[in-house]
Amino acid sequence: MKKQSLKRQAALIAFSGVLVKALGFLMRLWVSRSLGAEALGVMELASGAHALALAPAASGLPGAVSRMTAKAKDETQRQRILYAGKQLAQRMALMIVPLFLLLSPWIARLLGDARTLPSLLCYAPCVLFVGLSCVYDGACLGKGWALPPVISELGEQIVRLLSLLFLFSLIPLLTPAWRAALPALAGTLGEGIGLVIAALFYGRAASFRKDPVLSPIRKELWALSLPMILNRLSHTGLRALSGMMIPRRLMVTGMTPSEAMSQLGMLNGMVMPLMFLPGLLAGSLAMVGGPAAAKCESKKALRRLFLRMLLPALLSGIVCAAGLYFLSPLIADRLYRLPELAPMIRAMSPLAVLLPAQQALSGITAGLGLQKHMLRHTLLGAFVTLLHTFLLTPPLGILGAGYAAMFGHALTLLCTLILLFGRIFTPGDRILSA
């Protein structure tokens, strides 16, 4: 497969991102209408635990494989990196999946709603599927192949949509707990097909089972992955705590558990996905920006890459935020059939600028090996979010939780900008080591 330029990779991933995000948004809209705000809240509450289980395999390995593949000198070394990455993903899944299944009843009680248990059980196999898919995607992007990850993601979304078409026909026969689990089951089926597509596109991978070189490669992959894994674990862990805290803080104001869960579903299941819409461009930039940053040999090249990543992300975020602000009544009434969502969408619209900028810059930080710094920034932002969720939710209601999320993301973005400015725009042309 022919290697593609940075612009072509970004354009291809952005184009596919439009399709994937469009399918995802339609599914989210359909799910919210079919399940209702309360069941959507149960689904969102379980999603924090899902993300925590997926974090070790999905967060660090793709960036580490991509970076090492981009720096590899020959195809044999690239194949070794792929094989070592798959070994790590399999070992993680072997530890996480049985433990997650065993602890699922306890996690459901910890989340504060036993109805999350079916969702937790249905999503457990995704740990293996997502881990292996991420390794293949990282290997492809490190080689400059943008097409296989694109086709894999599109295939995953199509299968997820088709699965929901069938599964939602069973809604009248199911309890509310199992209704909330249907998107998780469809997601597992989609991830499995996405893995098959990724493996087929990459082609037959060589086997290095007894190769003594594998051990140091695994150690290097793990060293590169660990900061990002800790980053994601801490962020998703604090996000899960925030999701658990919001209904409890809302009930302090006199809301019933059902009303509080509906408010959580409105914020995390309806409003927040709108804020991630600009991420279709920023996500593509982050995916190709990591390998590109790893190959940069001068600060001048990094400065150009920095501007090529940040400016389009900011522009797309500003346009999207303006659209959400002015069209919020139309979106709330026509799309979700919940007019009360309009003030929430309008208040949260600045987040549509912060998220794509933060996402685009994360690719550069990963490519430069600055994951440890990002871990500190993410922890600080997540802690600020958690603190303000506790303080602002009772007096401001669900909007307090939304403002808390904005404060945390703004602080993380500011810290990332300060870090990159210090590394890229200092005098001299030599790239400072991480």
Image: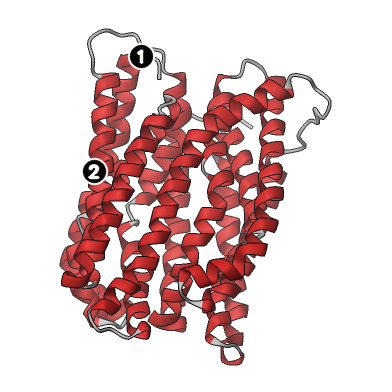
Please rate how many residues cluster around mark 1, counting C-alpha atoms within 10 Å: few if below 14, some from 14 to 19, many from 20. few
> Would you identify the image quadrant in which residue 248 lies?
bottom left
First reached walking from the N terminus: tag 1 or tag 2? 2
Q: Can residue 259 be seen in the rendering of this structure?
A: yes
Camera-nearest residue between 155 and 31: 31
Whole-percent x and y of residue 243? Answer: 38, 65
* 54 up-or-down from 229: above or below: below
> Depth-wise, is mark 1 or mark 2 nearer the camera?
2
How is the protein colored in the picture? secondary structure
Q: Helix, strand, or loop for circle 1? A: loop
As drawn, 136 above or below 190? above
Residue shown at 32%/86% (left/top)? 256
Q: Residue at x 48, y 64 (%)?
A: 47
Specify the label residue 411 is tagged with.
2
Q: Which mark is residue 432?
A: 1
Q: Is residue 75 visible?
A: no
Q: Amino acid at mark 1?
A: Leu
Q: Residue furthest right?
A: 210
